[in-house]
Image (spheres, rainbow, N blue to C red):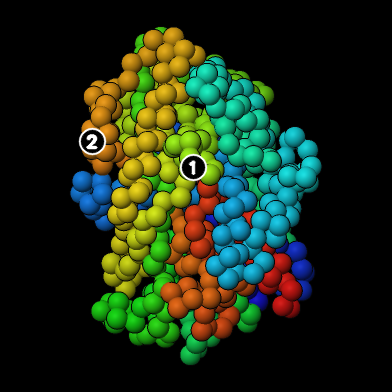
Amino acid sequence: MRDYVVIGSGSAGSVLAARLSEDPTVSVTLLEAGDEDKSVLIHCPAGLALMAKQTALNWAMETVAQSGLNGRKGYQPRGKVLGGSSSINAMIYARGQPADYEYWSAQGNTGWGWIDVLPYFQKAECNSKGADAWHGGSGPLHVSDLRDPNPLAQAFVQAGVQAGHVHNLDFNGPSQEGVGLYQVTHHNGERCSAAKAYLTLVRNRPNLQVITSAQVLRVLMEGRKAVGVEYVQGGKVQQLSCSREVLLCAGALQSPQLLMLSGIGPADHLQRQGINVVHNLPGVGEHLHDHPDVMQVVSGAQLTDSFGISLTGLKNVCKGVEQWRNGRRGMLTSNFAEAGGFIRSQSQEGMPDLQLHFVVGKLLDHGRKTVLGHGYSCHVCILQPKSRGRVRLASNDARTMPLIDPAFFAEPDDMQRMVRGVHRMREILNQPALASLGGKELAHSARARSDAEIEQFIRNYGDTIYHPVGSCRMGPGPLDVVDAQLRVHGVQGLRVVDASIMPRIVSGNTNAPTIMIAEKAADLIKSQL
């Protein structure tokens, strides 16, 4: 019997397990479906390039066929390892805009406005720039400038300024708008995942138990009270009881799946899957959304500062291996998406509605496709998509991946913004700082010039930038799943703590906000002891 059972060791679960176990009188068990985070591909930042091919670390899910993507299935990588997706992501530290959290609060979620959440960002953060009104300087999560920025990334920033955008030195400071180099979750040239930040130094606590290779099958319920979990490890199904709360931190795709497998969700869907309905909660799995994204790739034999497969590229990597091994410096400290920006798709927008990720390499098919030569890539995504989809069960077995439908471009406004976004992206890429390097845009995007052609390019090649949220939405309404304390409506002893609770997606990458959510959740839980 444990006081708390935490399901999932990702950006939220690692935080909760560490923070709750600070109290020596409280016992905590953390269950992770993946293995320990021992792979050098995790700790060496540039190992990211091979992550998409390493299904041992990655659930590598897919969406259902998307009509908005001309019938294609989208790719949904999720971390399957200690640290979850924070162990396989691009390590960008971005919080979004204060207005994002004001929206959360305005939906009836007291305590989730910007003034409420900023202290939790600061509590989590150890920024290499030091503490100030915007940043923390002593938290467990190390946030740093890139050690050795790639010259191409710096050229992108220069091109953005040439296109009329402000050079922003801190996307998490007073203003998000502009172009610049991203800060990353690195420490001394290594990835700083949530597991490394929060768990590594506290694994020896006698009141903290971390069990890996343990996939949770369902939450155990007595009536409408959560009393434990059932999980499988090494082919053996086991049960673990808890006396206080089960804390579901499996992410926006698997948290709603586990709720439904436990009998909590839309009754008609559960019944069709042969699952006994414990609590009819129609909003479970609804409101799924993500940042739709499309990428332009530029190729050129002379772009040898980029990562690429060539004789020069091999020499660069060999040099980088020695630099990283001997001092944690050099090109292997790159997160690839080194630069980017937050810009407006048109001047009348009140705030940035687009995000750019500039990648110092030719990235095709999410890195799953090996391509020869050198180049660079630039992504554009819309920050506040209106389209909403859902997560549903494919079967009543947790080992079967759920049906994921983000409904990309179901709302026409999303496509209109994306088309404008491609134009804005090209304006930057065509500036002298990059155009003078002589690269050529690959044909699949280069031939798309008119709005109609760009729309078809997006439908044929667009996908996600890996930020699913919203499927266990926080709020007081009939289609909301958790309250402002993150307690599941109508159920005792069960909370959801991860990106699935976001009432609306944040205007940026979701790792930092998810860590913030867990920091705040830990205090909410402690306040009720």
Secondary element type, mark 2: helix
Along the line of sight, which residue is nearer the eye, 483 or 148? 483
Which element is circle 1 on? Answer: loop
User: Dot 2, how many residues are within 10 Å of its Cα: few (below 14), some (14-19), or many (20+)?
Assistant: few
Residue at 46% from the left image edge and 57% from the top image edge: 469
In three-dimensional space, the C-alpha distance between marks 2 and 1, rounded to whole angstroms, equals: 22 Å
Query: Whole-percent x and y of residue 246?
Result: 57, 74
Residue 251 to residue 23: above or below: above
The amino acid pointed to by label 1 is Glu
**Residue 327 drawn above or below residue 236:** above
Q: Please tell me which residue is depicted at 26% across the width and 41% down the height of the picture.
A: 459
Q: Residues within 10 Å of mark 1 (few under 14, many from 20)?
A: few
Q: Quadrant of residue 465?
A: top left
| Quarter of the figure with the N terminus | bottom right
Is 237 left or right of 415, judged from the image as shown? Answer: right
Q: Percent x, y for residue 156?
A: 51, 22
Q: Which residue position holds label 2?
A: 452
Marks 2 and 1, the one that precedes in the sequence: 1
| Residue 434 horizontal/vertical position (percent) | 46, 15
Total count of labels: 2
Which kind of residue does numbered mark 2 sit on? Ala
Q: Residue at x 25, y 79 (%)?
A: 272
Disc ID at residue 307: none
Q: Which one is in front in this view, the residue at disc 2 or the one at disc 1?
A: 1
| Vertical order, 112 against 409 (above or below) | below
Task: Give residue 46's position: percent from left, percent from top.
Answer: 51, 31
Q: Are marks 2 and 1 in contact (CB under 8 Å)?
A: no
At x 69% / y 70%, what residue is drawn?
524
Q: Quadrant of the C terminus?
A: bottom right
Residue annotated with mark 1: 349
Quadrant of the rendered structure where residue 148 is? top right
